[in-house]
Amino acid sequence: MVFTTEQELFARARALADGGRRRILGIAGKPGGGKSTVARAVVAALGERARLVPMDGFHLAQSELVRLGRRDRMGAPDTFDAAGYAALLTRLRSDEAVVYAPEFRREIEEPIAGAIAVPKDIPLVVTEGNYLLLWPEVKPLLDECWYVDTDEELRVQRLIQRHIQFGKTPDYARAWVLRSDERNADLVATTADRADALIRLQHVG
């Protein structure tokens, strides 16, 4: 299945939300590939029937990354609490009245616990992140997982601009992207064939 228009995305998301029970939709892709933009667009299209719960809330805290010697690889698979993320997805599939999820704040580069409330009457949870198709414990907890396929030059430029926006110098931002983010992107690319659908859009939002 390949989506090439927003209308196709939104129609499929509405069908999932109309299924009679809570569904969890994953959106995966490379760093800077547009998965956050797609996820926000889907949630906006469904309004109060959907809630966004990003994987990024499970970044390890800066102090823990330093303790583990992984600060200079922030964003790599082992700089997240994958087991905690899977546990949250399991709770989101339960009958709890409200599940609280963490949110990652880029301006401070730290996760904030309990920032996203998901009441049990929300029929569609949208979660997005790099490693949804990499971590074996995650994919079985998703009803569907889509992979965002985007222009590589545009993706890299987006990443560089994002790092600059949040305080890095242009030279440092480019070096970080080409050293760290691109290593992660190569790993994520190997998981694309595990997705239930590919997203190939010219523009979202």
Image (tube, rainbow, N blue to C red):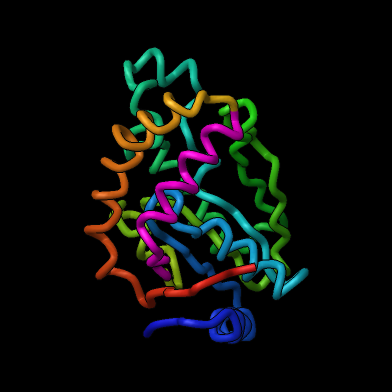
Percent coordinates x, y for residue 152 in the rendering: 35, 57
Q: Quadrant of the C terminus?
A: bottom right
Percent coordinates x, y for residue 72 in the rendering: 36, 22
Residue occupying image coordinates x 60% and y 31%: 166
Q: Which residues are magenta?
A: 146-166
Numbered-mark total: 0
Q: Is residue 121 above or below residue 176?
A: below
Drawn side of residue 193 relative to residue 64, left or right = left
Q: Quadrant of residue 193?
A: bottom left
Out of 40 and 54, give the one closest to the viewer. 40
Drawn side of residue 145 relative to residue 18, left or right = left
Q: Is residue 28 above or below residue 110?
A: below
Q: Is residue 105 above or below residue 88?
A: above
Q: Is residue 191 magenta?
A: no
Percent coordinates x, y for residue 34 in the rendering: 50, 59
Residue occupying image coordinates x 64% and y 33%: 112
Q: Is residue 20 visible?
A: no
Q: Is residue 156 magenta?
A: yes
Out of 122 and 194, give the one closest to the viewer. 194
